Image: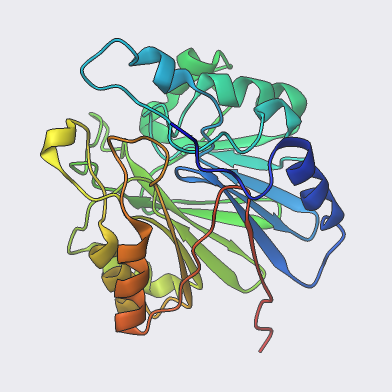
Amino acid sequence: MELINAILKDEALVAAMDRLLPDDAQTHIWWLGQSGFLLQWKGKRVLLDPYLSDSLTKKYEQTEKPHTRISERVIRPDLLKHIDVVSSSHNHTDHLDAETLKPILANNPGLQFIIPEANRAFVADRIKCAPDFPVGLNDGMSVQLGEFSFHGLPAKHNEIDRDEEGHCRYMGYVIRFGNCSIYHSGDTLWFDELPELLRPFSIDLALLPINGNKPERKVAGNLDHIEAVKLAKILGVKTVIPCHYDMFSFNTANVQDFVEEAEKAGQGYRVLRGGERFSFTLNES
């Protein structure tokens, strides 16, 4: 099967990112596939839930749940430099991938790594880091990392799952910098408390999954295209970028359904292809 091509990839993508490092006027965000994004602002880089390998395809190749890739990999992880912060929203491999994270950590020795506190021991074992290296968050907690503050929110995948100390195993993050708020939901279903938890942050840009929840897939699910638009509309989000589709053939969605729903609702959105950039200027008023 012919893979969906990235707009830019590997060295060409790095060059495009590097050219914009000196830009103080705009915020830039690139979709790296699945739920992975690179955020760039004033020469600083935040990497959100990157999955940049074929580890899941190899793991499930001879099983009843093959993870057949349908989009090409956007960038080799060893090419990512000048990363200040990287996140993992939960322990599933497409959000916590050793083959992706190990070269990124090796090439960015000053990097800080945000995880759900509940997952500390698992994370340390998977990526072979010191247990005290990651910065752990729980829902309702915040941490300031340089110019960026991270605020933890619960995610429902397929439950709001907590460890014995009450720490969330699945989380979303609101990232605040300058006067901008970006919500990266991680993997989550709709739950009724979510809009009220998010409302105080005045979200400007939401990065939301649209692949939905189908039990026959035998994996935990997510918002579908209708719920993603509904959440953004309730919150008055300026722009939604859909994600968590077009990676694996068994667990995807038709992004055109999202486009039609957003346009029907009058919701601002931007659909990206792998390696494509969305840039915006913060409102300084």
The single residue placed furthest to the bottom in the displayed view is 285
Location of residue 224 by image quarter: bottom left
x 78%, y 37%: residue: 11
Q: Is residue 77 above or below residue 172?
A: above
Q: Judge whether residue 203 can be spotted in this image.
A: yes
Q: Image height check: is 181 above or below 92? A: below
Horizontally, residue 174 falls left or right of residue 213, namely right
| Rendering coords of residue 230 (x, y %) | 27, 72
For this orientation, the residue located farthest to the left is 215
Q: Nearer the viewer, residue 244 or 124?
A: 244
Q: Inspect this view and state whether residue 121 appears.
A: no
Q: Position of residue 264 (x, y in %)?
A: 30, 82
User: Which image quadrant: the C terminus?
Assistant: bottom right
Left or right placement of residue 94 versus residue 224 in this view: right
Eyeballing the image, is 115 above or below 29?
Answer: above
The spot of residue 267 in percent (x, y) is: 39, 79
- Name the quadrant of the N terminus: top left
Query: In the drawing, does residue 262 fall left or right of residue 273?
Result: left
Q: Residue at x 67, y 69 (%)?
A: 178
- Residue 246 position in % (x across, y down): 41, 44
Q: Quadrant of residue 193?
A: bottom left
Residue shown at 58% from the left, 25% from the top: 100
